[in-house]
Image (cartoon, rainbow, N blue to C red):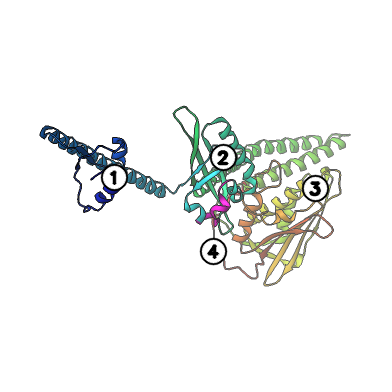
Amino acid sequence: MASLDLTVLGEALSAQPPWSDSPFIFFSSCGAGGWSEARIAELLGNVTILQRPVPDATLVSAARSAMRAQARRRRAREDHASLEEALRESAESYRHTVELSGQIPWTAATSGQLLGVDARWYALTGTTAAETLGGGWHGAVHPDDLDVVAKAWREALAGGAGFECDYRVRRADGGFVWFRSRAAPRLAADGRCIRWHGTLEDIDERRAATTRLARMQADLVHVSRLSAMGTMASTLAHELNQPLTAVVNYVRGSRRMLAELEGSAAVRDALVEADRNAVRAGEIVRRVREFVARGEIQRRPENLSALVREACSLALIDARSAGIRYRLDLDSSLGDVFVDRIQIQQVLINLLRNAIEAMPEGSARRIVVQTSRAPLGRCTLKVRDTGPGVSEATLTSLFEPFNTTKGDGMGVGLSISRSIIEAHGGEIWSKPARGGGAEFGFTLALATRLPDVPAVPRIPAST
């Protein structure tokens, strides 16, 4: 070449076959034309230019240097390819690991704005990137949880510590799923935060299982307490029976000794009253003992009016002293019902006790117990009170286990009452009473039409 035209030379080299990977040595009769070796290497690559005349030793040395340089470049390319392959494999392994774990990765800027999130987020929420990135993800968080999440995220950004928070995310179908979000800052060499990386983990099933376990544990505690109550009541009934019997005997002996004494009429009347009340107390203890007895349901014909009167005498024993007036409106034509007497009395006593507790002191406190005939060979028993009544919101779950409106209630009485009535083939309900208050009622089969229901184990009456 008359002059060193690197552009022409570069075009000539680019026209070489693609398999060519050897260094080139050009001999020129002119200088480098002012071009630096670095610029020549940048334009031509693995090219060496020698100016004639070239001694043999110089040519051999240049050829060896060019071959060594080419070998170094080849190794560098191979190392670079291996590194890229390792990076691709690492990225692919990370992607598979995240997908198998079910977690949704996301990244955020140091300002807290969301930069990116996995495609599964969009499939879950039915949103787009435009609706999510930045601060748009707030729209998918349950309104009740948004303040908690926002506060935890602000504190994490301000302190530079890790972030963790549980909250509900709206699905594309409108329902909500519990997620746990975790994040940590990625730091530069100087300790400065350059980005946040986090994950979203679906914990809905785990949270539901935890809630179920907590409910089961609470139920177990309640059942244990109820069992202890039954045992205690049975023990007390047994222990009180003996001293009450002794009291009755002493009172009656005293009455016989006073029978022949003059001027002891008042004392004799007092002893008669003491005798009557001691016998009454013994009868209450006997009924309590039957009340807490366990065994199989023993259904047989029982006179409904007598059954109701007996239950009322036990439940309303202190009614008059508490300012409660009650009335029995019983249909004597109903005759017998086919029931387990103790269990039906348990239901009635529970309804009467609830009615007493529902009516505040200082107000008109009245209770009406009514029986009447119902279709299909059944009868109805109702208990009405003059309390505040039952709210509409409470009616739907009134007979559910451990649901109570009392501050110190355990919420099992109505649930067990429903189980007893349904085991007898009847139904139980509650509704507002006419004129105010609440009305509870249930149905039973009359003895003339025996229900075709299987025998079931007795529900512990201690509750």
Magenta span of residues? 123-134
Relative to 148, say whether 397 is above or below. Answer: below
Check disc 3 and report its element: helix, strand or loop.
loop
| Residue 431 percent coordinates (x, y) | 75, 59
Residue located 53% across and 31% down the image: 160
Residue carrying label 1: 5
Report if the CB atoms under discs 1 and 4 are less than 8 Å apart. Answer: no
Residue carrying label 4: 454
Q: Amino acid at mark 2?
A: Gly
Of the pair 128 and 1, the residue shown nearer to us = 1
Farthest top residue in view:
190
Judge depth for marks 1 and 4 and give the one in front: 1
Farthest left residue in view:
56
Of the pair 348 and 244, the residue shown nearer to us = 348
Q: Amino acid at mark 3?
A: Met
| Residue 81 percent coordinates (x, y) | 28, 44
The residues bearing labels 1 and 3 have C-alpha atoms spaced at a distance of 111 Å
Report if the CB atoms under discs 4 and 3 are less than 8 Å apart. Answer: no
Report if the CB atoms under discs 1 and 2 are less than 8 Å apart. Answer: no
Residue located 56% across and 34% down the image: 157
